[in-house]
Amino acid sequence: MRTRLLAATLAVLACGTAEARTTVTIACGSVGIEAELCREGAEAWAARTGNAVSLVSTPPSATDRLALFQQLLAARSGDIDVFQVDVVWPGMLAEHLVDLSEHIDRATIGAHFPALVSNNTVSGRLVAMPWFTNAGLLYYRRDLLEQHGRPVPTTWAELEETARTIMQAERAAGRARMWGFVFQARAYEGLTVNALEWLDSHDGGRIVEPDGRITVDNPRAAAALTRAAGWIGTIAPRGVLTYGEEEARGVFQTGDAVFMRNWPYAWPLANAEDSPVRGKVGVAVLPKAEGGRHTAGLGGEMLAVSRYSTRLEAAVDLVRFLTSAAEQKRRAIRGGFNPTLAPLYEDAEVIAANPFFGELREVFMAAVARPSDATGARYNQVSAAFYNAVHAVLSGDAQAGPALARLERTLTRLRRGDRW
């Protein structure tokens, strides 16, 4: 079964010299410049070490890629040595991954953002090294804020008032399609991230805390969701209930929204030559609640080594090279990938390519992680229960308090006694 799966799904391409001592196989992302940059980095490592690298072409869908990795690892296959893993996968795959803290020195590990190191540490084992990161950001129409004499909002109340005021003024001027705020509210993983940002900015917890406690049923979390539900049909279109990242970007980039929550990838697209809002967009940290804190949902990709690799030393060295400062700098400049090393946010060449990196360094350093570390293999079920409950509140089908009480009971049933 595993052999047929690999034959049908994977195309393995070799880099390096025929006389190489060791061939390491790595599974990277397979779309666009992500695959290209991985290949370039792997080839550079091969040339430096005299080893060789085989790149595995994986499915473009993260869901399909995870399923493939889970099948290979469950079979204890050594066919892939190094895996590119999503930020929420370490807890699900941890039992099959090498503890990199036993192979990479503490100073090298400690140079990466603490939130990512913590996210990748499962039961005291560092199962993946940070490679690049993402965090949720607030995009805004700089020209409209200037035109209407409004500062960039720092609280949700300020965003609501500014969004409403500018939306109404623009509609009165004939732009009937203008909305105040768009974000990701479809019932999917993106809503988990958005809603976690709302909770954290209200000091409403992480759904499940790092020690495994279920804390989602609390008044501050309920207040956060009640506030967000109030946006639907007022400053946000009802259609936002079906929006993912690209739907939100489509509305914002066509000029029909004042504010947007999205990931950093939207920046070069919003400023592309054919973008209607080119040169009119600003980026800021997401708002906070009164008395709360600024926050951002953590995203990104990591590199992990399979426990079943027969080329452990070389595989770890490849991970060490690809996650190094020099390689992360190259990827940031060429592809806009956010580094996981703080000094690169002060590097002149990196900032020239990505102007908002320096201003928002603290956002990327302190982003809030989804509770995949605490919930492990059950994270997908936890996330689905959470985003479905949130979607019911946003849709008006449930009140926040009762919905969160039901959610906590569901999560308690998912947890096996006092353990996940």
Image: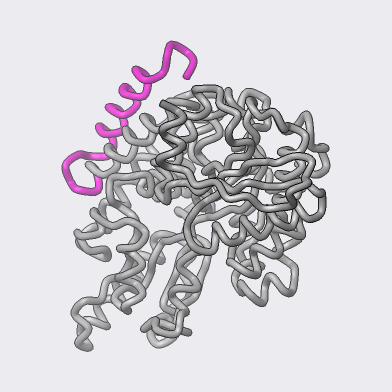
Q: Position of residue 198 (x, y in %)?
A: 41, 49
Q: Position of residue 189 (x, y in %)?
A: 37, 44
Q: Residue furthest top?
A: 417
Seen in the image, is 285 located left or right of residue 388? right
Does residue 169 belong to the magenta stretch?
A: no
Q: Residue furthest front?
A: 18
- Residue stretch in magenta: 393-420
Q: Residue at x 32, y 40 (%)?
A: 387
Q: How is the image coloured?
A: one colour
Q: In terms of image quadrants, where is residue 94?
A: top right
Q: Residue at x 55, y 46 (%)?
A: 12
How many numbered circles does the render carry?
A: 0
Does residue 408 belong to the magenta stretch?
A: yes
Seen in the image, is 290 located left or right of residue 346? left
Please tell me whether the stretch drawn in magenta is mainly helix, strand or loop.
helix
Q: Residue at x 68, y 32 (%)?
A: 126
Q: Position of residue 68 (x, y in %)?
A: 44, 35
Seen in the image, is 210 located left or right of residue 7? right
Relative depth, front residue between 327 and 28 = 28
Where is 148 relative to 243, above or below? below
**Does the image show residue 72?**
yes
Q: In terms of image quadrants, where is residue 312?
A: top right
**Does the image show residue 198?**
no
Q: Residue at x 38, y 49 (%)?
A: 190
Quadrant where the image shows the N terminus: top left
Q: Position of residue 41 (x, y in %)?
A: 68, 57
